[in-house]
Amino acid sequence: MSAAAATREEIFEILDEVKDPEVPVLSVVELGIVRDARVEDDEVTVTITPTYSGCPAMRVIEEDIRAALVAHGFAAVNVETVYAPAWTTDWLSAEAKQKLEAYGITPPGPATRQSLVSLTRAPSVAERIRCPYCHSLETTLRSEFGSTACKAIAYCSGCKQPFEVFKAI
Amino acid sequence: MVSASPAAVPNEFEYLLRLGDDRLVLGHRLSEWCGHAPILEEDIALANIALDLIGQANLLLGLAARIERKGRDADALAYLRDAIDYRNALLVEMPKGDFAVTIVRQLLYSVFALLQAEALQRSTDADVAGIAAKAVKELRYHVRHSADWVLKLGGGTTESRARAQRAVDDLWPYTGELFLADDVDRAVAQTGIGVDPSPLESSWQSTVRDVLGRAGLTIPDSAYMQRGGRQGRHTEHLGHMLAEMQIVARSHPGASW
């Protein structure tokens, strides 16, 4: 493909092959990390936004994006980072959420503002977390912090399995 | 975007250091728990919160360095400044103490930081506003984490309650400084880039008193408040912490990996 002739959609198609290193079932496009792409002359500029301020995967993601575009024949690749609008899990499509669940991570619910103290009330039925393995709602949130910044830890009483939940943010 | 007039630069730089240094120092204090927390979930939680805070610090100090235009970057500001040049509040440099000290401090600081970040979303500087909007989402998780634990510790055993009460008594005199405004705060509030911290105090008091009250913990009567961190007058604890935090960067100047 000639770099100068590439469209924004074609760039997005290439970047849809770049998986998130910590959630390899989703691409950086599906996660909403890639915000924009533009081609000027022979140069392609990709705009990305971090999921969390301290996400340690951002550097790897940047390098993976650059490598993917270079592999498709783009010689000059710029990756720019923006912070606004702030990343939200509401950008994940229904399809992306299904992929997460199939991978064994409960997808995020809507990123509504939750109470600042959670212990004083029991979660409503709608707030209950569904186990990605056996789909039971008999689950408990063990910690709102998990193996990566974007995940929480829960436990299923149905299948006696601990599992991960993609945090709504 | 960075478009400050030359005369405004020192105030903006100072202000961004205050925002960044609070987060960097507290992030490092939390990272000291890595591998030492009472349970695995908390080890992970404290490391995650440290990561959020250090990430926010990296963005804020990077912005400070760009405004300063002296060729420094976030790493130079973090690793090559001495304690006297740090602008964090004294509260965040106190040693991590036991789990109760760490959790009570998290509540006291996170509620303040959340109110501050909510206000900074309206900053006239698009970079500051963007960083703040992101931080708000993260800080809400931090507040909920610490508030839930304060309730557990206060309502737990005689031991956990006594330790939580001691932590409140010891840390309370360091909270007043968070809301003290000086010329730097007033200057950045005037230009709209920053916020004056003093009006945040009433909301902070009501949230913190509500949580501590429900946990059965009392607030000390003493009105005496420590101060000095914002002007670089620190306790002996910061120097020791920086010695550990900076040793690798200072021993191997310019190293990359």
Image (spheres, coloured by chain):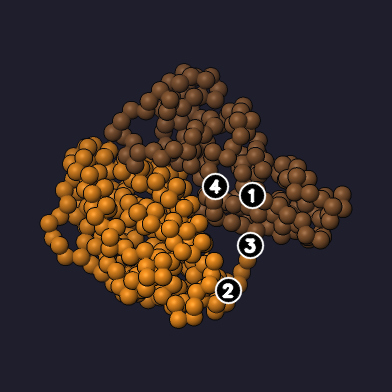
- Crowding at dot 1, Cα within 10 Å, few <14 / some 14-19 / many 20+, comes out as some
Q: Residue at x 49, y 34 (%)?
A: A110
Depicted A107 relative to depicted A169: above or below: above
Q: Which residue is mark 1?
A: A35
Q: Quadrant of residue A27?
A: top right
Q: Which residue is mark 2?
A: B253
Q: Chain of mark 1?
A: A
Q: Are marks 2 and 3 in contact (CB under 8 Å)?
A: no
Q: Chain of mark 3?
A: B
Question: In this rendering, do the residues under marks 1 and 4 share a single chain?
Answer: yes
Q: The N terminus of chain B appears in which quarter of the rendering?
A: bottom right
Q: Which residue is mark 4?
A: A87
**What's the amino acid at mark 4?**
Trp
Question: In this rendering, do the residues under marks 1 and 2 share a single chain?
Answer: no
**What's the amino acid at mark 3?**
Trp
Q: Which residue is mark 3?
A: B257
